Image (tube, helix red, strand yellow):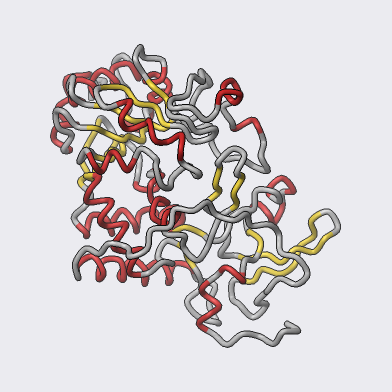
Amino acid sequence: MPPLNKERLFAELQALGVRCGDTVMMHSSLSALGQVDGGAETVVEALLDTVGVEGTLIVPGFRDSSWGGDATFVNTDCRDQCPQPLCPSKMPSIQGIITETIRKRPGCLRSCHPTHSWLALGANAKRVLINHCTASTPSGAHNPFEQLVELDGCVLMLGVGINTVTLWHYYEEVLGVPYQGHYWPDIRHFNNCVPGRRIQYDYPGLMQDVCHAAGILTTGPTGKGRSGLMRARAFDSFMATIIADDPNCMVLRPTDRESNDLFIDALQKARRMLDAWRSGPRRPQHYKGQPPAPITPPGKDALVREDCPAFAGYHDADGQPVPTCRANGMHPDLHQLGGVFEEYGVTTCDRCAWHEQFPRLSESQ
């Protein structure tokens, strides 16, 4: 097969559902497309031709996660001016060469967020980015997704899967779900995976199937790979419905006291998502959008459910025994210690809805 050229990619993007005038929020991988004649520049040109002069491209300008407030992952060349309507930072995104190609384009704008800024190029660039400076977290209220929904735009996964979409966390944050991540208010950064393993990251193929079955995801060939597209309003409605139905639907827990199998919980949650969606879209009744409280390693008086099938025992952290959990993600302060802390997270039993299914242990336990 000859290298992918602009004309062929243009046709494939149209077949996928990208329309002239669309505002497109994109996650991408150049290598997944195979050999591209002209590389990332050709991909960007094809995208701009597809959306036209009235369209807009939005891509992540993320600096990645922040472990323990590490400035490595922060836009440091504009901090003395932060917050402001748009960010003048010239620091590169680590989200791939396509996003960097867009960032370097004349007219590209950047939203104001220290770790998770967005880049936008096109007619609605300023509109979609301008409110991000008021957001207390990367993915919650006032991020560019809200304007994407208003504009009836789309989420494009160019050569990548559903697990790359950041906005799964949107309703988790604005609704203040029972589990919360680690929060650094100074850099408005929020690690979403400390108090739970997320279904879209552990079982992305399952969530891809769920979105297909729900009718909100279209997939098709792009070069040697496959891409996906969701209309923003459909994705927004789906997220609102499944989290209103079950606030814990995106986080995995063992399904019974005898099992450590998170996949069983993932299958049950996937079925419930589809049942809720097919019963009719729902909107959440309570909009919070408040900054989360930090989660730190539990103190001596913290609730620790040693009888929970997710309990992974106590492990040493600089001489301090820390209770760990198989169903939690890495804790940012303990990740640097390596070992078990790269696989399990700390227990967050006091913020985990799972243990409420069973009688509490005695106070001594």
Viewed as shown, does residue 239 lie left or right of 299?
Answer: left
The picture places residue 260, in percent across and down from the top left corner, at 54, 72
Residue occupying the point 61% across, 40% down: 66
Q: Nearer the viewer, residue 193 or 135?
A: 135
Q: Position of residue 348 (x, y in %)?
A: 62, 66
| Image height of 120 relative to 90, above or below | below
Rendered residue at 26%/27% (across/down): 124
Q: Quadrant of the C terminus?
A: bottom right
For the point 20% across and 70% down, which residue is it? Answer: 279
| Residue 278 point in image, percent of width and height | 19, 67
Q: Residue 205: percent from the left, percent from the top?
A: 35, 54
List the single residue furthest toward the right: 319
Judged from this view, the residue extending furthest toward the top is 106
**Please, is residue 9 above or below residue 66 in the view?**
above
Please report the residue visible at 65 percent of the width from the left and 77 percent of the height from the top: 305
Number of numbered discs overlaid on the protein picture: 0
Q: Is residue 314 rendered to the left or right of residue 181?
A: right
In the image, is residue 2 above or below residue 134? Answer: above
The quarter of the rendered structure image containing the N terminus is top left
